[in-house]
Image (cartoon, rainbow, N blue to C red):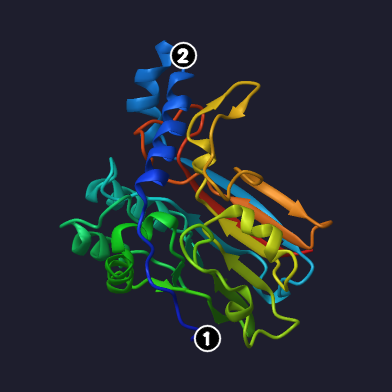
């Protein structure tokens, strides 16, 4: 495995205006939940983890790697209604899926690492994967100068953080790339830097916290983009869908998308944790298992 070093950007502080805007939008979503569903949305659904399993086919996927298992998790928001014991259960759940590769698509924390950072690192180090664990930062990982604290937790947890970088992974005599860009909202993503040195024939799996970055990624040599950020809306209503989604997740909100006749496939994970309000409604937290195939 080799990381292409391309540098990174300094953290950006959360503004009072952006926080108030997020809080107001979330409050609007909460108000639309039927009164009888509030207790369920607060105490039941946020803890009811769903494991989605998908088989994805790509013309450029190495045939020698057919059946490779990739697990994606996203948006822990550690420290905000998601603590050490919840992370311990999640790590066990991921390991039970026997992944070959684990990908984390950002928002490790909500608004602070807190004193449980070392415990989080210890648990992350328990993730078992033949090809390792790779991650990108989410917008919450930049707030209040948090970036270096988050970087430390991930590094001590054995997680490889991709900041406008790529890694070449090899198995069974075949290889592919995992690339990662900085967050589209609070960082400075640079896909050209991330793909520096990537050969035209190499399959590229891109990690981007913000799903709407796909409209830029499709212009590049990228086959699959994994994203989070949206939480699937966190509150969804029948016949309406997601009530509110944050910036840069307005177009691709949850699930699988195919762009330009399959040139780029995109998957948006609903995330594990919650943000702003500790609720989920018709939008369970998600762990995703992809089985990769040539086809």
The residue to which callout 2 is attached is: 34
- Identify the residue at the far front of this view: 17
Q: Decide if residue 273 is in sight here.
A: no
Secondary structure found at label 2: loop
Q: Residue at x 40, y 44 (%)?
A: 17
Neighbourhood count class around disc 1 (C-alpha, 10 Å): few under 14, some 14–19, many 20 upward: many
Q: Residue at x 33, y 66 (%)?
A: 147
Q: Decide if residue 106 is in sight here.
A: yes
Q: Is residue 267 toward the left or the right of residue 112 in the image?
A: right
Q: Is residue 157 above or below residue 193?
A: above
Q: Is residue 207 above or below residue 22?
A: below
Q: Residue at x 49, y 30 (%)?
A: 235
The residue to which callout 1 is attached is: 4
Label 2, label 1: how many angstroms apart (C-alpha)? 50 Å
N-terminal of the pair, mark 2 or mark 1, is 1
Q: Residue at x 84, y 56 (%)?
A: 261
Q: Nearer the viewer, residue 232 or 14?
A: 14
Give x and y (percent) for residue 99.
Answer: 49, 62
Give x and y (percent) for residue 225.
Answer: 63, 61
- Identify the residue at the far top of this view: 36
- How many marks on residues? 2
Neighbourhood count class around disc 2 (C-alpha, 10 Å): few under 14, some 14–19, many 20 upward: few
Q: Is residue 136 toward the left or the right of residue 113 in the image?
A: right
């Amino acid at each position: 495995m080799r990381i292409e070093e391309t540098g990174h950007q300094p953290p950006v502080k959360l503004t009072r205006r952006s926080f108030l805007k997020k809080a107001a939008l979330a409050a609007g979503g909460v108000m639309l939940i039927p009164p009888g569903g509030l207790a369920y949305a607060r105490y039941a659904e946020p803890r009811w983890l769903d494991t989605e399993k998908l088989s994805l086919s790509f013309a450029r996927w190495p045939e020698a790697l057919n059946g490779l298992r990739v697990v994606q998790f996203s948006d822990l928001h550690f420290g905000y209604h998601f603590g050490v014991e919840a992370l311990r259960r999640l790590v066990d759940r991921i390991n039970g899926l026997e992944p070959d590769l684990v990908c984390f698509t950002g928002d490790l924390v909500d608004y602070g690492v807190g004193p449980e950072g070392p415990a989080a690192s210890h648990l992350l180090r328990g993730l078992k994967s033949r090809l390792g664990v790779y991650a990108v930062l989410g917008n919450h990982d930049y707030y209040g100068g948090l970036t270096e604290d988050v970087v430390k937790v991930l590094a001590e947890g054995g997680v490889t953080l991709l900041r406008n970088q790529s890694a070449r992974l090899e198995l069974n005599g075949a290889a592919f790339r995992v690339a990662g860009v900085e967050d589209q909202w609070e960082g400075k993503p640079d896909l050209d830097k991330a793909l520096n040195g990537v050969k035209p024939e190499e399959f590229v799996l891109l990690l981007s916290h913000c799903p709407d970055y796909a409209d830029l990624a499709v212009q590049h040599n990228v086959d699959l983009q994994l994203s989070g950020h949206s939480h699937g809306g966190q509150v969804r209503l029948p016949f309406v869908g997601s009530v509110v989604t944050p910036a840069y997740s307005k177009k691709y909100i949850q699930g699988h998308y195919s762009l330009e006749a399959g040139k780029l496939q995109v998957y948006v994970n609903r995330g594990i944790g919650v943000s702003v309000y500790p609720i989920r409604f018709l939008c369970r937290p998600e762990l995703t298992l992809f089985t990769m195939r040539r086809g």
